[in-house]
Amino acid sequence: MIDGGTRKTSRFWADRPLAVKGLVVVILPLAILLGSLVSLYLASSAETRAENDVRRAFAIQRDTYQVHALLAEAAAGVRGYVLTGEERFLQSYRQAQDEVPATMARLDTAIEDPVVRGHFETLRLRERDKQDGLKQIVSLAERGTEVSSEVEDALIANKLALDEVRRCIDDIQRREAIVLDERRARVDEVRRGFLVVTGVSALVGLLGSLSAVYLFSTGIVRRVRKLEADAQALAEGQRLTDRPEETDEIGRLAQRLVRASALLHAREHDLRTSEERFRLVIERVRDYGIFALDPDGNVTSWNLGAERIKGWRAEDILGRHFSRFYPPDTRDHLPAEMLERARQSGSAEDEGWRVRKDGTRFWANVVITALRDEQGELQGFAKVTRDMSERRRSEDALRTAREEAEAASLAKSQFLSRTSHELRTPLNAILGFGQLLEIDEENFQGNHREAIGQITKAGRHLLSLINDLLDISSIEAGGSDLKLNRIEMNELLDEVHALAFPIVASAGLSYELEQAEQPAFVRADSRRVTQVILNLVGNAAKYNRGGTFVRLACISGDDFVKITVEDDGPGIPAEVAERLFTPFDRLGQQDRAKIEGTGLGLALSKSLIESMGGEIGYEPLPRGSRFWFKLPRPVAEDDTPADDLSPLTEETSCQLD
Amino acid sequence: MPARLIDTAEIVSRRILAIDDEEPNVLLLRSLLEREGYTDIHCLTDPKSALAAYIDLEPDLVLLDLMMPEVDGFQLLEAFGRHDRAEEFRPVLVLTADTTLQARRRALALGAKDFVAKPFDVVEVALRISNLLETRVLYERLRDS
């Protein structure tokens, strides 16, 4: 029960606010000190009173002796006066008459003790008797009476009266001596008591101060120290567990520290969990080698991908320098350069050969990123490596294929150029000599002239065949140098008119032209488009037996421009129409044997139009035929305008079929 | 035929050197030139001897094929250019079956004065020859005056 009570008290004390505690600690010793001072004051005033009593007792003794002495001297003086009659003996008498009443009055006020008071009243009576006696004697003597018996009697009576006085005084003195002793004893007692009070006050003050300091140091300093220790622990990242119950400021502060610790701990836990998760993710990435380096380039972490790509296990590579991943020819400088670049600009990327643990090489894409803390201090590097060998191989394969294709293409164009040369060279002699013979034809017979004509005609046919064939081949080989420009078809048709009109007119047909109402822009090679139009017009003119016209029209569509070439000739049988654009497939050969042509014109036109992104086709008309082609419109506004004036444009002859 | 600045007799007397590795083409050129009345015609089918002939003969006009074995027409054009003085005008007419733009550009850049593709029109070639010789004669007159 007592223990519980103490605990309750100490809890009550602990829960008080610091201001209250401070007040108590300061006031308690002060109050004790004040109490000591009060008791000291009381003790000293008691002593003063006792000493005053002693002094008064001495004064009473002195005054009573003085009364006796004055009366005795007055009696002696009176006696002398009586004997001598000399006035001078009365001086002491008169002095007693003056001083005794004053002394008696002093005694009257000073005497307090009742016993002494009784003696004093007796003394007062005896003193009057004495004074009266002396007065009577003096008056007797003045009347000049000789020493008579009356005087004698008076003197004796007076002498007795003095004795009475003396007896009273002795009584008073005795009593006063007793009273004095009593008072002295009381003064000693009071003084002793004073000493005790002083000692006790000093002791109590000391103890009070000590207990205040004790309270302060045990109740507050101890807890502040504990708090400091808690804060230190918190700073070191330890977890605070014991939650104090006190509710004063220190207690609340301590509780908050504990709460902060719990919060910190929870956050740390979350962070660790997330870090752990992140680490696991990194570790399990298989396709990328992800690892960390310290600022000097030594490996500090290693993931599964890195192990898979480089062949090193984590325990073998951790702590080693990453330059060992580089082949000997770059090992001396590239790793340092990469780190320096990453240090300077944050990250560095590289693609090149790296070596595995077993010494084999692989083609890698590497990104090194500098890792810096919040103060910008370099903590190390993160390195991500990808094995690009597969891609490198496919790129190599692709490059090889492309190079082979390019080589094949080059070989083909060289072959075409060679073939062209080789075929033209003998044709030059054939046509040249044929032409010379034609010039001199008057030297020859009619049948020889015809033979010469056949030679030059066949020679020219062969030449146009060669030209068409080479054209088609070079287009198919992608070697045709198409110059795609933004061109306006109405303008082009105007230009074509000068070339097409004579062809149509020489076949005895009328030439009709229908242009588009709006400007019709296309993206095409104007020279090649002209070639195709002339081919189609030439065909229409040649095969339009019994018809009257060849009509050329331009139709502007949404995303294309269509050119049609129509005639009102016999048309083309449906069963052969599908083979129109096939090379060397001259239609109705037996019927058309007399018509000159290589059979390549439409095939070449098709190749040309398709190489410009267009379409070509044929459709029969109720009477006649319609050939058409479409060309795409320019894709964007930034197409350069037609620059057909370019001096580099290759000159070609349009081969008609 | 349009009026000429130079008498035809003066032109056809000029020396022509034809270089072509194909015998029939050389024969064609000789036939054409003879028919036109030229008298001083020299033909070569071996391009290796062409430079020596060029130096020896000092022709007024060279008819040159481009694609020839061992020494081609381009090399010969360069050799001719190195041999002649800078101000000399000795025209070369290139006659070739190589019809590519590159061949034409290169030949003309190397100093050829004209270029005709094979198979050629004999009348056209005869006219170009006479035109070039006319220029050659005019050049000589200017030089010697």
Image: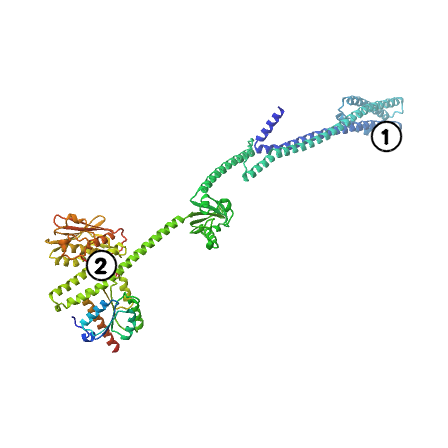
Which of these two is toward me, A395 or B108?
A395
Q: Position of residue A416 (x, y in %)?
A: 26, 58
> Is residue A517 in view?
no
Look at the image and tell me in which quarter the C terminus of chain A lies.
bottom left
- Quarter of the image where one finds residue A288: top left
Q: Earlier in the sequence, mark 1 or mark 2?
A: 1
Under mark 1, the amino acid is Phe
Q: Identify residue for label 2.
A: A467
Q: Identify residue for label 1.
A: A89
Chain of the residue where label 1 is placed in the rendered structure: A
Residue B54 is tagged as none
Under mark 2, the amino acid is Asn
Horizontal relation, residue A334 to residue A474: left or right: right
SS state under label 2? helix
Q: Position of residue A599 (x, y in %)?
A: 19, 55
Task: Tell me if label 1 and label 2 are in contact, CB under 8 Å.
Answer: no
SS state under label 1? helix
Residue A382 position (above or below residue A242): below
Residue A294 position (above or below residue A530): above
Which of these two is toward me, A283 or A163?
A283
Horizontal relation, residue A656 to residue B107: left or right: left
Horizontal relation, residue A5 to residue A386: left or right: right
